[in-house]
């Protein structure tokens, strides 16, 4: 719906809250299968099926027995493993195909098994069993993906297979830059800058506004996690706040995502607030594009298999919510002047009155020196107690620091993430507090302190 005059007044008031009450931040809210064909045997059993890998990691072919024993003197069975992974079949008597291997074939590729026992009237050659999945689980485009318990960002009990639902829209996004943060305290982090895009669907047509961030994390076992923050503008002018979380097994480029929408309750698009959605996200690095498909899975049928994601043992899980450990201000660490764009009022939605203030740049000085990267914003909830949640990135001589500074006025607590062996690794200790936003050139000024 079009933003009405009364909302413009609210937007203006929210802007005054930012400057007059020193509130420059906000809350993001809280939000292969393939059978094996057996060879026929003249006088023996025919192998009509093979091992099917329905879980595991990227097993697109499962174990296949391509031959069985002949009953007339017995030709050797040449059954072995086909596909991208799995335990090899090293032979076996001819005929009956291998059993169904749940968890699927894993690993980096199996060797074709050679040889089979010969014999008159021999039974069919047994196909090899599906291999153990690699660390982190296995891929399965039609499987339910169950994230590691540390992944607490939408459908933690299992993300439905999107294509079993109904397509809502397809989005094509432009990736204008990638900040390779490096190996941080959580894993290998990259930040993809979203430079805009388009959304097309029967019930939703929109543009994706520039300034979004895709926070992509690859764990040491190859599992990928992500959180993406975007703002959409529907064809009728309605603004939509979109926070997307996702996870993918090791070796899989397609990420299973759970989008969470916030739109004004009074909008004709308010159905986005209450729907159950899942989708896929893929990146074409050579074309600098990202494709996102979103489905309504509220009535999706159950998938035939489940893929369980496992985080590396002893790994520090990334936080999905704000840090709430407060304390007194100690020594000053660094000060930043953050420049801001015009406020974007989502309006009253399922978590409250959402207001977004885009971040357009800035400077940093102190124990950290550098600039604030264009993008991100303060995704604040305005009300009796305004909660700020600023998400942005600092660039400093080739190093990057991800900042999330959130909480109510008077109790802002930052979370930092940067290269574990870099010059600013001391920020990863989570022992800091923030000042409230003060007036700055073109925006706000904020100082971070050691926590006492």
Image (cartoon, grey):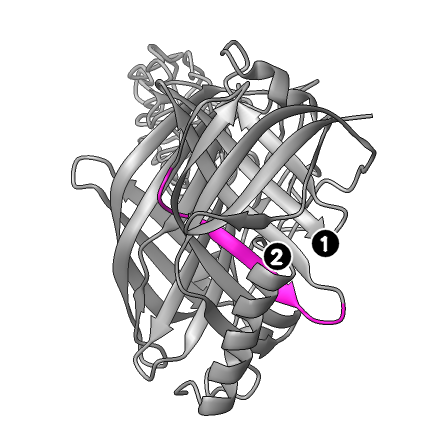
Label 2: element kind? loop
Label 1: element kind? loop
Report the Cα–Cα distance between label 2 and label 1: 7 Å
Name the residue rendered at 40%, 52% in the picture. 280
Give the residue pinned by disc 1: 409
Q: Residues within 10 Å of mark 2 (few under 14, many from 20)?
A: many
Residue 239 vertical position relative to residue 446 in the rendered view, above or below: below
Side (left or right) of 254 relative to 257? left
- Earlier in the chain: of badge 2 and badge 1, it is 2
- Kindly check if marks 2 and 1 are in contact, taking CB atoms under 8 A apart as contact: yes
Residue 239 vertical position relative to residue 73 in the rendered view, above or below: below
Place of residue 197 in the rendered image (x, y in percent of width and height, measured from the top left): 26, 59
Q: Residues within 10 Å of mark 1 (few under 14, many from 20)?
A: some
Quadrant of the drawing holding the C terminus: top right
Side (left or right) of 147 relative to 180? right
Place of residue 192 in the rendered image (x, y in percent of width and height, measured from the top left): 35, 39
Q: Is residue 326 visible?
A: yes
Place of residue 76 in the rendered image (x, y in percent of width and height, measured from the top left): 31, 14
Give the residue pinned by disc 2: 23
Residue 389 marker:
none
Span highlighted in magenta in the image: 373-384
Quadrant of the drawing holding the N terminus: bottom left
Instruction: Quadrant for residue 181, please give it.
Output: top left
Residue farthest to the left, as pictured: 287
């Amino acid at each position: 719906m079009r933003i009405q005059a009364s909302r413009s007044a609210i937007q203006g008031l929210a802007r005054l809250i930012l400057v007059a009450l020193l509130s420059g931040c906000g809350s993001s809210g809280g939000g292969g299968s393939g059978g094996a064909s057996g060879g026929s045997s003249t006088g023996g059993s025919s192998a009509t099926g093979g091992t099917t890998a329905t879980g595991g990691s990227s097993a697109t072919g499962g174990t296949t027995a391509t031959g069985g024993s002949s009953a007339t003197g017995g030709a050797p069975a040449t059954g072995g493993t086909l596909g991208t992974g799995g335990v090899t079949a090293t032979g076996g008597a001819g005929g009956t195909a291998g059993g169904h291997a749940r968890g699927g074939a894993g690993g980096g590729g199996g060797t074709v098994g050679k040889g089979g026992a010969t014999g008159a009237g021999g039974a069919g050659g047994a196909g090899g069993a599906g291999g153990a999945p690699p660390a982190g689980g296995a891929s399965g485009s039609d499987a339910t993906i169950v994230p590691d318990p540390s992944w607490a960002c939408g459908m933690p009990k299992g993300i439905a297979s999107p294509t079993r639902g109904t397509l809502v829209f397809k989005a094509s996004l432009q990736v204008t830059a990638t900040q390779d943060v490096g190996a941080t305290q959580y894993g290998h982090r990259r930040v993809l800058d979203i430079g805009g895009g388009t959304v097309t669907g029967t019930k939703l047509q929109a543009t994706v506004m520039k300034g979004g961030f895709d926070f992509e994390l690859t764990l040491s076992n190859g599992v990928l996690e992500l959180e993406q923050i975007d703002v959409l503008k529907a064809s009728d002018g309605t603004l939509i706040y979109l926070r997307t979380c996702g996870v993918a097994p090791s070796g899989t480029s397609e990420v299973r995502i759970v989008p969470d929408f916030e739109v004004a309750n009074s909008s004709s698009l308010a159905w986005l607030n209450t729907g159950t959605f899942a989708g896929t996200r893929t990146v074409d690095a050579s074309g600098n594009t990202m494709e996102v498909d979103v489905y309504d899975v509220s009535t999706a049928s159950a998938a035939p298999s489940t893929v369980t994601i496992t985080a590396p043992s002893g790994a520090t899980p990334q936080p999905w919510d704000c840090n709430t450990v407060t304390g007194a201000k100690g020594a000053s660490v660094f000060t930043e002047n953050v420049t801001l764009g015009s406020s974007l009022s989502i309006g009253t939605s399922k978590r409250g009155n959402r207001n977004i203030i885009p971040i357009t740049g800035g400077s940093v000085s102190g124990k950290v020196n550098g600039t604030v990267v264009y993008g991100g914003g303060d995704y604040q909830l305005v009300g009796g107690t305004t909660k700020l949640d600023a998400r942005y990135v600092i660039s400093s001589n080739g190093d990057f620091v991800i900042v999330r500074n959130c909480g109510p006025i008077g109790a802002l607590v930052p979370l930092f993430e940067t290269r574990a062996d870099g010059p600013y690794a001391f920020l990863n200790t989570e022992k800091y507090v923030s000042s409230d936003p003060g007036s700055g050139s073109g925006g706000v000024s904020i100082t971070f302190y050691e926590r006492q």
